Image (spheres, rainbow, N blue to C red):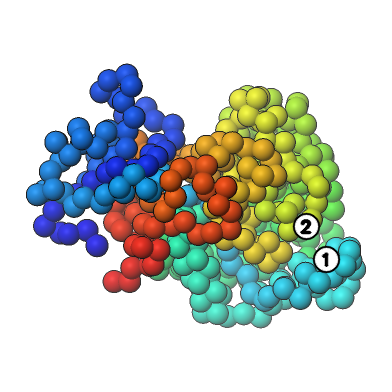
Amino acid sequence: MQNSQKEGIVISNASELYLGPVSNYEPIYSNEIPDAVVIKNGLIEAIGETSTILSNYSKFDYEIIDCKKKKTVCPSFVDSHTHLVFAGDRSHELRMKIQGKSYLEIAQSGGGIMFSVNKTREASKLELEALALKRLDEMLLHGTTTIEAKSGYGLDAKSEIKILEVIQSVNEKHPIDIVPTFLGCHIKPADYLGNQWEYIESMIQLLPQIKHQNLAEYVDIWTDKGAFSVEESQHFLNESKKMGFKLRIHADELENVGAALMAAELEAVSADHLLFAEAVSASALAQSQVVANLLPATPFVLMLKKYANYRMFKDAGVEVALSSDFNPNCYILDMQSVIGLGSFMMKMLPEEALRAATYGGAKALNRENEIGSLDIGKKADVLILDIPSVASIPYRFGINHTDTVFKDGKIIVKEGKKITN
Ligand SMILES: [Zn+2]
């Protein structure tokens, strides 16, 4: 822990220091390669070369963490698309997936999304909390300090509210910051008797309570073939917008139905998945400054050949985020693996993937002024990785490289282990 006698912490001699986009830090001289960061009062106080920094911030006043040119320092990860809260384990479905059984066949044999929905409806708040806290610990140990978490495995009024209350409660208990999203319109549940419009109305009726209890900052809807149409989604999103909710959208994952264009039109904060989005959608997203939130773990676990077209969004000038899409069908909590998939499956350069997993994620949650890059005055959410370079994150795939995690300037993971206090 930070020694309370000291004024702050200096992280020195990073083998690589990845800052991300910065506007407040200016190098003292043109060829300065910063390898040190100073943390004070929970914020980034200074950035620079170790020799200069140590002459201004002495070991008498500051705790020094020396990376000895062996460890990489970067902003901690922001996972901007997760379905954190659900019950039930679907590992048994993997066999069927590998044997080529379709989604429909899996659903007919009692699996798929309704399996998770039923287990989640049956689970108590305490059970859901325990599951969520364990998952959050795993995320933290892999270097994530802020996530977005959606409801969407309740799909009825009572269970959707229950999930949002669980998200609110674990947010208070766990050091990871959670941005909550209401995804009552994930799909129309198989056991709902009315039509699709009636289901949407039933979810719209929950909005005042969600607002009143401060249970969600965002709403989300899945706009796609087999999910909700653009027309239905527009209705739900417009009603939500009127009540002051910000918007994010599961868009064009299975087919190009115009969901990304709708996201641009409604000025959503992010459009997510986007496997089938085309160039015209990319320019619309750029124009409206909607973040393209790409989730390569999903096509990976679905064993698809198709991934979102990162380069198309990048070239159109869209800010790209990378996130896990952690859900019962995609049990990936680790953003280092997501960066690996971004590099190997979507041809993102390691620094592009890291930017998307930090600054891009922060922008996808409207928090890019506070977190997502190491800049003077920003929150000290910082990661020390036990690898020589940023490129080692994807290159040394499947290994947890986390050494130290700082949240608001406090060390909460040390030598890869969570500090309990
Ligand atoms: Zn999702």
Q: Amino acid at mark 1?
A: Lys
Q: Is residue 132 left or right of residue 20?
A: right
Q: Residues within 10 Å of mark 2 (few under 14, many from 20)?
A: some
Residue at horizontal 14%, vertical 36%? 55
Q: In the rendered view, would you say 410 is above or below 156?
A: above
**Label 2 or label 1, whichever comes before in sequence order:** 1
The quarter of the rendered structure image containing the C terminus is bottom left
Instruction: Give the x, y percent position of residue 88.
Output: 67, 76
Q: Is residue 300 left or right of residue 395?
A: right
Q: Nearer the viewer, residue 34 or 244?
A: 34
Q: Is residue 283 left or right of residue 396?
A: right
Q: In the rendered view, would you say 209 is above or below 322?
A: below
Q: In the rendered view, would you say 129 is above or below 416?
A: below
For the residues marked 2 and 1, what is the alpha-carbon distance in whole angstroms? 8 Å
Instruction: Give the x, y percent position of residue 147.
Output: 50, 54
Q: Is the Cβ of the residue at disc 2 closer than 8 Å to that at disc 1? A: yes
Instruction: Give the x, y percent position of residue 181.
Output: 57, 54
Residue at horizontal 63%, vertical 29%? 314
Q: Is residue 122 visible?
A: yes
Pick out the residue farthest to the top. 30
Q: Report the residue marked by disc 2.
A: 302
The quarter of the rendered structure image containing the N terminus is bottom left
Residue at horizontal 75%, vertical 27%? 279
Q: Residues within 10 Å of mark 1 (few under 14, many from 20)?
A: some
Which label belongs to residue 358? none
Instruction: Give the x, y percent position of residue 26.
Output: 31, 25
Residue at horizontal 79%, vertical 44%? 306
Q: Nearer the viewer, residue 239 or 65?
A: 65
Q: Is residue 145 visible?
A: no
Q: Report the residue marked by disc 1.
A: 97
Query: Would you identify the image quadrant in which residue 209 lies?
Result: bottom right
**Residue at disc 2, secondary structure:** loop
